[in-house]
Image: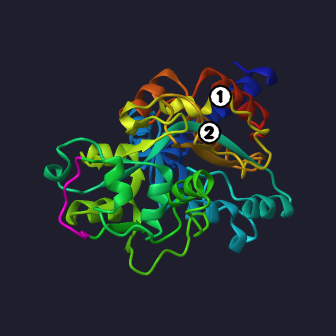
Amino acid sequence: KRRSYAEVQRELMVSQIGSLEAEVQTLRATTAAVTAAQPIRLHGSGTTNPSKYFWQVMELFRERARMQLHMTYRAIGSSSGQFEFVGEDNDFAPFNDFGSGDIPMTKTNYDAVKAAGHDMVHIPFATSAIAIFHSVPASAHGGSAIKLTGCVLAKIFSRQIKTWDDAEIVALNPGLSVPANTNIKVVHRVLGSSSTSGTTEYLEGVCPESWSLGSGSTITWPDDTFTAEGSGGMASFIQENEYAIGYLDAGHGHSLKFQEVALRNKDGLSLVSAQADIGAAADGTTFPAADADWSAVNLYDKPGATTWPITVFSYFYVRKDLSTMHPHTAALLKAFLTFSWSEEGKSLLGDFDFTPLPDSMVTFNENTVIGMMWPAG
């Protein structure tokens, strides 16, 4: 029986559809293989202080993701993180997907980003304490915290006070008993550090008459002080040298069970950071718009009976316009940012001695993220 033209065409169409379906399945398999072989990447760099928290969050993301993730964070210090974020040596394209620091972007760096035609935002994600730790043997002070004022600390770090039995220290600690003329081994960070910036800005503000070394992530210290590279180097020096004193993020020092100085706060009360309400320093503070210059923002020496005098925000530095970022990377970055103020993220911050943000700052950050420019899709 002869077939009609329509029947012949129908059979041909069925055959072509079958071939197309096979090609689609092959294409899907190939795409899946390529996707599996190409992980979604996210890279950050900056301050050492929250690095363990970041690494823990990244590990959680990798465990829960259905696709392969390659997430890294290099703990290189706030100043280096700002340098990589600004990207001045890279035609002002950042070397990282986000930066992080315990200090705001310096005015010089912020202005450089703006002058290059870009906008950036500050996203605070936690508050934390910079604390003063020492290695005076417990037998010399009976296990009680050694008390210092901001001015006495300024004199110690600037080497106007050089021995632990100096009259000004003994007046604050009448039970302190150390060998006569025991040298105070002042140790400080050698490279750009937000901890250096926080400590020196605090000293400059609280006791300018006793602190003339300036402030910033690096300063010129007296010749008879000791240097340490990174928080790890600072911690090692305090561990290995009796009668040393230095500054560290509080969580790091607490994890090593270091002895902490009880610092007098603005209300005249002496306390260690573990006794303080770290988040209280942010109460009532007014902040600029997220994409404005934050270089003048600080939480040092704020009032309150339980307020810690050297409190800092930890920030994400992020470009405001991310429309040209790969959509997968942008989605991962957004998830990473917002995790820090989720209930799970806030709980995890507490595990690393950070204080989560108050609700008002969470709302501020949510509006910042909404106002950023993200890639389509």
Q: Residues within 10 Å of mark 1 (few under 14, many from 20)?
A: some
Circle on res. 124: 2
Of the pair 129 and 320, the residue shown nearer to us:
129
Magenta stretch prevailing secondary structure: loop
Residue at 37% across / 67% down in the picture?
A: 187
User: Disc 1 vs disc 2: Cβ atoms closer than 8 Å?
Assistant: yes
Name which quarter of the figure residue 156 lies in.
bottom left
As drawn, 177 above or below 228: above
Residue 171, given in percent of the width and then of the height, sits at: 35, 51
- Per the image, the residue denoted by label 1 is 361
Q: CA distance from mark 1 to mark 2?
A: 8 Å
Of the pair 45 and 330, the residue shown nearer to us:
45
**Horizontal side, residue 330 vs residue 178: left or right:** right
Residue at 50% across / 48% down in the picture?
A: 39
Q: Residues within 10 Å of mark 2 (few under 14, many from 20)?
A: many
The amino acid on which the numbered mark 1 sits, given as a three-letter code, is: Met
As drawn, 42 above or below 355: below
Instruction: For mark 1, give the secondary structure.
Output: helix
> Is any part of residue 22 visible from this angle?
no
- Magenta stretch: give its range: 175-182
Residue 111, given in percent of the width and then of the height, sits at: 80, 61
Q: Does 177 lie within the magenta span?
A: yes
